[in-house]
Amino acid sequence: MESSNAPTIYSITESEIDLNELLAKITLASTGAAAIFTGMVRGVTNRGGAHETEFLEYESYIPMAEAKMKQVADEIREKWPVVEGIAIVQRIGKLYPKTPTVLIACTAAHRDTGVFDAARYGIDRLKEIVPVWKKEVGPNGEEWVEGDYIPKPGE
């Protein structure tokens, strides 16, 4: 899912996230900056009081999730036309503490072009509209973790 002029990657995967491979795919000859956000599984969570997490189980309806990831990438390009490359990758399956679960990377010619804001927007928007669900499993049981966002019609 990549075009040569504006490389864009978006995927749901059970495989490890390979930062170097993704950066190589979204870097152009003119690229001088990359802003990267990676979410990780915490071993201790403070939601509702501190508690241990043994692992998280992520699930997704992949066709819809990838369509929404493309929407996020399109929105980034509309707001920050100077962004050269975009990678949006979400892992699913059973993931243990200290494991990367999601990666958003944006590249541009320079760091002061909005590339940091674009990456931040990417993760915030992914959390809002991409259908990925997670179940937290710990020594005291399991719980589906719900977000606060309710999509508006047409989102």
Image (cartoon, helix red, strand yellow):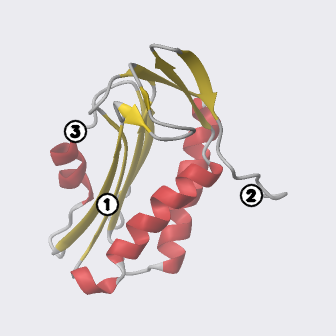
Say which residue appears at 32% left-offset and 85% top-offset: 113
Q: Position of residue 107 (x, y in %)?
A: 28, 68
Mark 2 Cα within 10 Å, few/some/many (few <14, many 20+)? few
Q: Amino acid at mark 3?
A: Asp
Q: Position of residue 57 (x, y in %)?
A: 49, 22
Residue sticking out furthest to the front = 49
**Does 109 appear above or below 150?**
below
Say which residue appears at 21% left-offset and 54% top-offset: 23
Whole-angstrom CA distance, mark 3 to mark 1, is 20 Å
Whole-angstrom CA distance, mark 3 to mark 2, is 30 Å
Residue toward you, 47 or 22: 47
Residue toward you, 138 or 58: 138
Disc 2 to disc 1: CB gap under 8 Å: no
SS for dot 1:
loop
**Does 83 appear above or below 140?**
below
Q: Position of residue 95 (x, y in %)?
A: 37, 23
Query: Would you name the residue on which mark 1 appears?
Result: 4
Asked if residue 72 shows in the view, the reply is yes
Whole-angstrom CA distance, mark 2 to mark 1, is 28 Å
Query: Would you name the residue on which mark 2 appears?
Result: 155
* Horizontal side, residue 107 vs residue 137: left or right: left
Kindly indicate the quadrant of the structure image that contains residue 119.
bottom left
Residue sticking out furthest to the bottom = 112
SS for dot 3:
loop
Q: Which mark is residue 118?
A: none
Query: Would you name the residue on which mark 3 appears?
Result: 18
Residue toward you, 89 or 45: 45
